[in-house]
Amino acid sequence: MLAAENVELYYGASHILRHVSVVAEKGAVTCVLGRNGVGKTSLMRAVMGLQPIRGGRILWEGEDITRLRPHERARRGLALVPQGREIFPRLTVEENLETGLAPLPRRERRISDDIFTLFPVLRDMRRRRGGDLSGGQQQQLAIARALVTRPRLLILDEPTEGIQPSIIKEIERVIRALAARGDMAILLVEQYFEFARALAQRYVVMERGEVVLSGDSDHMVESDVRRYLTV
């Protein structure tokens, strides 16, 4: 469904991504692994159109979307859960969810009950302000806000960062359930190896803006991957 091919990305004179390619397929989790600063978030921003690329192309469901703006990609079914969550702290949980409805046609702008089935805690906190939630609850809210768009590609940028273990288990459960539906591709950025290994069908490891390892998770060699994760 998604194919980023030979992506070249610069910030000013700094060459951030070098011939990076990644594929995310429907019904599967593709995990992008690597240390801080290797270009993982830049790649996700390139996929969403938040950062223009200088070379390569982004294909989505057979269409070249390289030149489309972020909101145009969102209308085609792409959704991003950014690193750091970026919820609106002064808005209620329900209002935060409603901000995610913008890409949908007006007649479809409603919050599905499926959201609260996946994240029961959000139903109980609908009237609470986002800034009053714990870090783990804010992460669940950020994922739910992306899901209200009914995406066909869900991009999760380090969803376990700074999250307590019990919430990590909840997020793992949700990602597994979404993948099992078979109608969504999931692109997951992670540094937490165990979390990635438990979920991913395919993996890509990055180092200094390049892909250094990739393949099916069944053939992942833990020692090879871990040497690109340890500081």
Image (tube, rainbow, N blue to C red):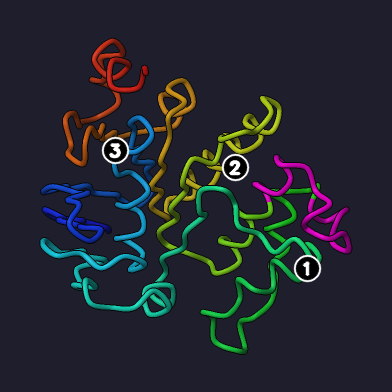
Point out residue 115 in the picture as x, y percentages from the top left corner.
68, 58
Helix, strand or loop status at disc 2 = helix
Q: Which residue is mark 3?
A: 38
The three-letter amino acid code for the residue at tag 3 is Val
For the N terminus, give its image quadrant: bottom left
Residue at position x 19%, y 49% in the image:
17
Residue at screen point 39% across, 41% down: 29
**Horizontally, is 198 left or right of 107 in the view?**
left
Check disc 1 and report its element: helix, strand or loop. Answer: loop
- Residue at screen point 44% across, 31% down: 199
Mark 2 and mark 1: Cα distance apart in space: 24 Å
Residue type, numbered disc 1: Leu
Q: Residue furthest bottom?
A: 106
Quadrant housing residue 114: bottom right
Q: Secondary structure at mark 3?
A: loop
Q: In the figure, is residue 59 to the left or right of 38?
A: left
Identity, as a three-letter code, of the amino acid under mark 2:
Val
Q: Quadrant of the C terminus?
A: top left
Q: Which residue is mark 1?
A: 91
Judging by the rendered image, the residue that carries numbered circle 2 is 174
Reading the chain from its start, which is encountered first: label 3 or label 2?
3
> Mainly helix, strand or loop, the magenta region?
helix
Residue at figure coordinates x 69%, y 67% from the top left? 97
Is residue 133 inside the magenta stretch?
Answer: yes
What residue span does the magenta drawing correspond to?
122-140
